[in-house]
Amino acid sequence: MTMDGISDYKVILMLGSYDDTTKKIIYRTKEHIIQNFSYIDTSFFVFLLDNLDIYVADVIDDQNETKKIALILEKYYDNKLTVFTIYADLIIDIVDITIVNDMDSTLNNFLKEKYVESTFYRLTILEQLKELTRLTSLTFLIRDQELTRGGEYIEMVYLLSRSLKPENIYFMKKEGFQLSAMAMEIIDYSKVQFRCYIREIDLHREITRIIQNQER
C-alpha cells in the first residue's frame, strides 16, 4: 500500500463503561456492524479503546524522507495484532502480525522491517482518544447499566471539547433507568444525538439504521 492511503473508508468509535455486561455488548455490536456492512465498497473500521494501543513514530524511509506516523495496534485472539499505519490522517497500511515478547519489542521489530530508522512512543489514553477523533466518522457511547463508573460521560465531554460535530456523536441508553439531570443537560445543551433501546437487538438495529442513513 502506498502513501496515497485507502481511498474509501469509515472509522466508527465505540465507547462505554467496561463492566462485564457492557463490554460484551460493545464487542458484539462491533461484530454486528462489520458483518452487516461487509457487502458495500466502503471499508468499515470499528475501534474500541479497550483493545487498542496507539503509538506515534518518527521514521526515515528508504528514500531518506522523514515522516511522523501513528500506529493503531488492535489486539485480538492468540497474541495477534492488526497494525493500522496512519500518515496525514490517512490509513496507508494494514498488516496482521504476532506479538513477540511484549508490545514495544514487537512494534520495534515491525518498524525495523519497514523503515531505515525509527523512534516511537505510546500515547496516553486521552492522547489515544484525541488521535482517533481525527479519523472518526461516527461515535457511539453505550450506557447499558445504571451502576457503573460513568466513564462514557467523561469521554463524551472530551469529544465535544475536541470540536467533534455533535450530530455525529450518539449516546445510546438502555431503557429502565434515568440519567442524572446534569448528564441530560450536557446532552441537550451540546446537541448530542440521544437514543434509547430496550434489548440488545434493538441497539444493533438502531446503530445499523444510523450508519445506513449517513451513507446515503
Image (cartoon, rainbow, N blue to C red):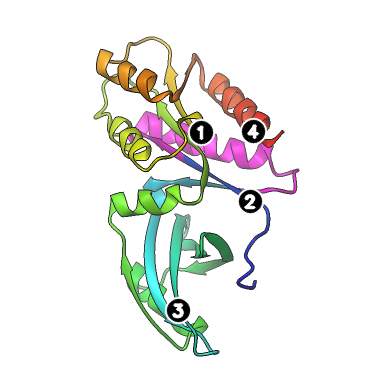
Query: Which region of the structure is painted magenta?
Result: 14-43
Q: Which residue is under mark 1?
A: 168
Q: Earlier in the sequence, mark 3 or mark 4?
A: 3
Amino acid type assigned to the residue bearing label 1 in the image: Asn
Distance CA(mark 2)–CA(mark 4): 13 Å
Question: Which residue matches tag 2?
Answer: 9
Q: Is residue 132 above or below residue 176?
A: below
Report helix, strand or loop for mark 1. helix
Give me the C-alpha separation between circle 3 and circle 4.
Answer: 36 Å
Residue 111: mark: 3
Viewer-nearest of labels 2 and 1? Answer: 1
Report if the CB atoms under discs 2 and 4 are less than 8 Å apart.
Answer: no
Q: Label 3 crowding class (10 Å Cα cut-off): few <14, some 14-19, many 20+?
A: some
Image quadrant where one finds the N terminus: bottom right
Disc 3 to disc 2: CB gap under 8 Å: no
Mark nearest the camera among 3 and 4 is 4
Q: Identify which residue is drawn at 61% across, 23% down.
A: 205
Q: Earlier in the sequence, mark 1 or mark 3?
A: 3
First-in-chain label (2 vs 1): 2
What residue did someone put label 4 on?
Answer: 214
Q: Quadrant of the C terminus?
A: top right
In primary-sequence order, the first of circles 3 and 2 is: 2
In this rendering, position of residue 4 left or right of residue 191:
right
Inter-mark Cα distance, 1 to 3: 34 Å
Q: Secondary structure at mark 4?
A: helix
Magenta residue check for 137: no
